[in-house]
Image (cartoon, rainbow, N blue to C red):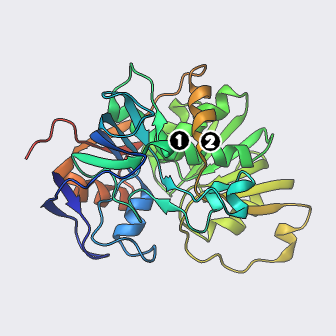
Amino acid sequence: MHAQVLESPGQPLRPRQLARPELEEHHVRIAVGACGVCRTDLHIRDGELASPKLPLVLGHEIVGRVIEGGSRFETGARVGVPWLAWACGECRACTSGRENLCERALFTGYTRDGGYAEETVADERFCVALPEGRPDSELAPLLCAGLIGYRSLRFAGDAERIGLYGFGAAAHIIAQVARAEGRRVFARTRPDDREAQSLARELGAEWAGSVDDALPEALDAAIIFAPAGELVPRALAAVARGGRVVCAGIHMSDIPSFPYELLWGERSVLSVANLTRADGSEFFALLEHMSVRTTVQPFGLDEAEVALARLRAGAVRGAAVLVVGDHRS
């Protein structure tokens, strides 16, 4: 089985031929059609997230077809494999509906091998049944960028004026969901990132500009997708009293100190950690009644390092996706 493998954080992925793993109880073997390239992959590859499984096959936005194993899906069923690979089901977090906070949880493309490969193995109980009718590459970003964006939007409550900080894979999906729900979207990007601002406007943002530009009015909530801690106090300064700042990434640089007056007025800051199976069920059910398109830039499996470099440089419009299905080596 051909795969792109991380052997040491901070080092380039290497093409490798891997043995097909044996299937355990509840496991299914999946032929990978496409795998999204997530910023979390970049954090792992660059050594910013501690203790990954090594060697490791990255990738947790996987769309493919079941080859064998398990009992939930028929052979050939189209499935998605998201970030949460397994949770214990027994701890206080799991039994209170918060399996995303399980301390024993395992994660696809981090503590279990993921989808930068021709095949992957996953626990069928944590897979998502996917609809037909859309290319694998268009569905792949929904498995993390979409799901984390959806959970972040729910955490923003009933906020009408939503600020999205960083307009990449997650923001370009959730901006469409927010607009469909009747919310107003304000997109804030890196200085001079005209491409992302243009995409934001195409997808319904009523205002798009640099984080250095003044907003036309205060926000009710801000969702920070960019891994930049310095944006937290800036977002607090942009939300009205009672506003909420949601930090959506798994990794962020240090948040600088800020005066209490930015937090005062019942403003709040909270983080989004991982996702639950319920998030997947709710999100894909929502998409059955809502038109949401993904803007993707495809790469071949052996171009994984190129895709990660483009993502690191902020040079991806929408989401980067590895198209794996036609690769044979």
Q: Within 10 angstroms of label 1, few (less than 14), some, or many (20 or more) residues?
A: many
Residue projecting furthest to the left: 329
Residue 39 found in image quarter: bottom left
Residue occupying image coordinates x 53% and y 41%: 146
| Viewer-proximal residue among 257 and 213 | 257
Front position in the image: 86 or 8: 86
Q: Amino acid at mark 1?
A: Gly
Residue 43 lies in what quarter of the image?
Answer: bottom left
Q: Are marks 1 and 2 in contact (CB under 8 Å)?
A: no
Identify the element where label 1 is drawn: helix
Q: Secondary structure at mark 2?
A: helix
Q: Look at mark 1 in the image and give the residue it sits on.
A: 146
Q: Is residue 180 above or below residue 218?
A: above
Q: Which mark is residue 279?
A: 2
Report the label total. 2
Label disc, if present, on residue 154 of the rendered structure: none
In x, y percent, where is residue 100? 62, 56
Considering only vertical position in the picture, is 243 above or below 231? above
x%, y% of residue 127? 46, 41
At x 59%, y 34%, the residue is 281
User: Whole-percent x and y of residue 295?
Assistant: 41, 35
**Gap between marks 1 and 2, in whole Å?**
10 Å
Q: Is residue 39 visible?
A: yes
Which residue is rendered at x = 67% and y = 56% of the image?
94
Query: In the image, what residue type sits under mark 2?
Result: Asp
